[in-house]
Image: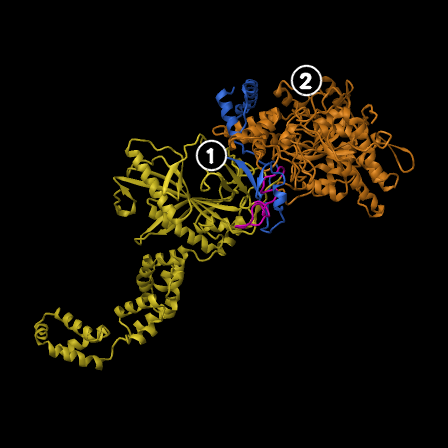
Chain colours: A yellow, B blue, C orange
Amino acid sequence: MSTKPTKGGTGMQRDGWEAVIGLEIHVQLNTRTKMFCGCEVTFGEPPNTHVCPICLGHPGVLPVTNEKAIEYATRIALAFDCRIADHTIFHRKNYFYPDLPKAYQISQYDLPLGIGGHLDVELEDGSNLRVGITRVHLEEDAGKLIHTGGTSGRIDGADYSLVDFNRGGTPLVEIVSEPEISTPDQARAFLTQLRSLVQQLGVSDVNMEEGSLRCDANVSVRRPGEPFGTKTELKNMNSFRFLHRGLEAEIERQIDALESGERIVQETVHFDPGTGLVSTLRSKEEAHDYRYFPEPDLTPIELDDTYVERVRSGLPELPAARKERLMAEYGLPSKDAALLAANKPLGDYFEAVAAATGDPRISANWVMGDLSAYLNVAGLEVSECAVSAESLAELLGLVRDGTLSGKMAKEVFETMTATGKSARTIVDEKGLGQISDAGELDAIVARIVAANPGPAEEFRQGRDRVLGFFVGQVMKETRGQANPQVVNDLLRAHLA
Amino acid sequence: MISRQEVEHVARLARLHFDEEELARLQPELGQIIDYVRQLSELDLSGLQATSHAVALKNVLRPDEPVAGLTQEEAISNGPDVERGQFVVPRIG
Amino acid sequence: MIADTGDCGRERAGDGSVLDVTTLTAYRCRQLLEDGEVSATELTRAYLHRIEAVDEAVQAYLLVDGAGALGAAAAVDAKPRAERLPWEGVPIGLKDIFCVKGMETTCASRILKGYVPPYDATIIAKLRAAGLIFLGKLNMDEFAMGSSTENSAFKTTRNPWDLDRVPGGSSGGSAACVAAAEAPWALGTDTGGSIRQPASLCGVVGLKPTYGVVSRYGLVAFASSLDQIGPITRDVKDAAALLDIIAGRDPRDSTSIGLSDPIGVPSRGDLEGLRFGVIKEFVGGACDPGVRDVFDSGVDAISMLGGVCEEVSLPSVERGIAAYYLIAPSEASSNLARFDGVRYGHRAAHSEDLLEMYTRTRSEGFGVEVKRRIMIGTYALSAGYYDAYYAQAQRTRTLIIQDFERAFSRFDFLVSPTSPTVAFKIGERTADPLAMYLSDLCTIPVNLAALPGISIPAGFSAGLPVGLQMIGPHFSERGLLNAAHAVEQKLEVDVVPPLVEVAG
């Protein structure tokens, strides 16, 4: 398979195809209690120990909406810059499945809580991708099914299944993106960004392994410029890695199919993490007819401006606002500010370094340059970095006061990441202090000029480039520790 | 009027099964009822809102406070088939 | 069923006189208890005996909890009278649609046979707190779907006025029970007339409150936007008292509102200054002439009391049945989907896979009418049909609400016959479902508009009871019950059917 990146980031093209991806994300809220009843939201507890007649779907029970869930969903919608609906209602989504106790899920349909937002995604190449957010809505989670008998706990071949309703009724916020993502890499970046943003809101653990962050994808392929192809729904990717692999596999499958003259069927495609393959469940079951109708047991929710503003004012500083502030406070260029705003831990790190050094420019250069490069290569999060903001600030202090040249500082930094030692310690241990003392350097410069009359003469004849040779010699002599600016001045003096 | 095919489709959606005899009775009955209720389509109600609740309430919410639920034993007590604290259902696939 | 203690239906009161339960209202029971003339145990026993004596014929009860009732009565008797709550010790019958913790609740359906709720409905908790004695669970049309109680999976209740006739439905068991004095009062539910129509057919009082006055938590749902719980009693005073016990906003029911003030004891003697609209569409051709005559005498009584009666037309109510038979089955098809054999109730044995289990469980467990309505509802909500059917019906509902609003701008209350006919013979209408639906003409629009409606006995036609329906604006229960009380007192209709007791 040949993949050629296209210009303008319009997406992966294999043999003239491009992919169109939309993501459907479910975030499990960390409210104390469930969406429609007072059972506690828990994880990993013995089965059916956090249930009540309501979340078990007994005859006669009624749901009552959790006010915290409304607040959390509003926070999420505002974080994506959505418009909050002034009249939002719940609908029943009707279908039969053992983990769905009422045989309907209370969800939202045509009047969701939040509409028309966006998420700015920082891509690996440094560019920004703005992905539209179609809607943000609330719903309740289903219970958990375990398939037993058969092999490996998968549904095919299982003799029977067991149902645990502890999870049933947990509040979920569904976030739907516009189909504006073009590659598995972009999808991954989107989800990473989303996860980081939601985490900042304090409304969810957003942990894919635990299931508090789930992601399905709608995938289609087309020739550039043509209308959208038929899309499939890709499910069961429960890690970032699987999301990427699943998308790759499904895009591959669709292109293969279309190139062999087959048509894409609109259906659910299942990702198998074990094999890395996608398979279509061509079951006899027809497409679901959910028979949506407004939930008669619940009232509409009308959030007025006062409420929305209260929630908004309680939000942590969001990327858009942070970007503006970074530009204003630190004089950072737009692109740098955007990058630091999009990645909260990195932005926090930068601000700590800038505060300690008092020099935003050198701080930004280092944080976005050497530090980020190191984190990338080592595969680490900012929180896992061996070099604290204070430590980096100390290093930068040594550059600013002339103790270290920029080049030396990079070496010291490398040692810092490897050993965890402070800059000062390393400088002292290795005797790395930059030599800036003109007196000390003057003797060396004089010696080298005297030892190289030929090049000295060439320089006096006007060949400026020869200066570089002398600088190199001085550096060699001083093991790179001479202050280049001082050396330059001294050489010109001696070569004059 | 409702076709035999539609009756079977709706029955599947509702997880109901009817034998031949039942279908023979049900199809005309449903047809008759649907023809009767279809009279509403004669009305021009385009200017009206649909009423879900005749007595309009809004923003009825509850605080995020735990309320005692059922023990596991109580939860599974009515279960037709239970195992290890969970409800058993036959093969899904 | 219960221990035989001698004289059937005639318990000896403390002073040796015979306690004839057919003469007792709930207030009278309360009086006897307060005065010490009868103990709670004696009173409960008297009712249990009466059930034993007549229920073989009437078939009102699905379950009689003799032991539980006597136990509860004994607990009441153990309390000094001065410390008792006002209604403590008064027995009551409950439609088998309310979840009572620890007591089998079937909704007269095979699919719930053996289901024992792990919780109490809110109204049940209120009755318990008030100290009422639960005699047992009363028969009904399966899942409240029906107008005759012939759709019960277990038995057919008979009208105490003529045992070959239906008691009405779906709260037929409750109405027959009260008419036959098998309880001083009972609770039923009304979605399209299921309290008022059986009350009318059985010659007792039945009240459907404004939607939202009584909590639905623990009421097995039929049509969520229409269901309401209400009293079935021997007189309007009792209905007011029972409503006061069960009414109230419930945090467990998002659609509940309660009443701003209790009703108290209706005391209105005349109807001076009140205007009554006679709903033209309900006294037309569909109405039986004998019923019309009795209704007219009811209107005369209103006039004699000083009320002004005038005909009023609500044209859209003729669309009520069509709208109802779209909205109710649609909501029901969703509400009944939870009966899938997974967590409670009937499960078909030996299923190969889940689909088979679901399908066989539901096909075996539900009766014919329930299945019919699930089919209609599923159809009406299915892809492509929602707007033409369900949404159009909800728009029709708006039209009907507007007609009522217009009427209430001119009238204080509206009146009509409760049912176009008297009780029909058992089996007479079962072959034609649509004909059965059409008998709800006068009651359905009241549910669609969420208004309060009461049926009071107005007289007899060919020896069978005829009810007069009075309808009020939203939350007008106090005025409505007072007006109804005045008419009831004026009409003085005998509510005791000539039931012959069987030796127990």
- Asked whether the viewer can see residue C326, the reply is no
Q: Secondary structure at mark 1?
A: loop
- The quarter of the displayed image where residue C271 is located: top right
- The quarter of the displayed image where residue C337 is located: top right
Relative vertical location of residue A454 with respect to residue C119 in this rendering, above or below? below
Depth check, front residue: C365 or C432: C365
Asked whether, in this view, residue A121 is left or right of residue B37, the answer is: left
Q: Secondary structure at mark 2?
A: loop
Q: Quadrant of the N terminus of chain A?
A: top left
Q: Position of residue C347 (x, y in %)?
A: 59, 32
Q: Quadrant of the C terminus of chain A?
A: bottom left
* Mark 1 residue crowding within 10 angstroms, few (<14) / some (14–19) / many (20+): some
Depth check, front residue: A115 or C168: C168
Residue matched to label 1 = B93
Q: Chain of mark 2?
A: C
Asked whether, in this view, residue A324 is left or right of residue B65, the answer is: left
Asked whether, in this view, residue C417 is left or right of residue B20, the answer is: right
Confirm whether the magenta stretch covers residue A54: yes
- The stretch in magenta equals A36-60
Depth check, front residue: A328 or C376: C376
* Disc ID at residue C34: none
Query: Disc 2 marks which amino acid?
Result: Glu
Residue matched to label 2 = C428
Q: CA distance from mark 2 to mark 1?
A: 46 Å
Residue at point 26% right, 47% down? A7
Confirm whether the magenta stretch covers residue C449: no
Q: Chain of mark 1?
A: B
- The quarter of the displayed image where residue C160 is located: top right
The residue most toward the right is C16
Q: Are marks 2 and 1 in contact (CB under 8 Å)?
A: no
* Mark 2 residue crowding within 10 angstroms, few (<14) / some (14–19) / many (20+): few
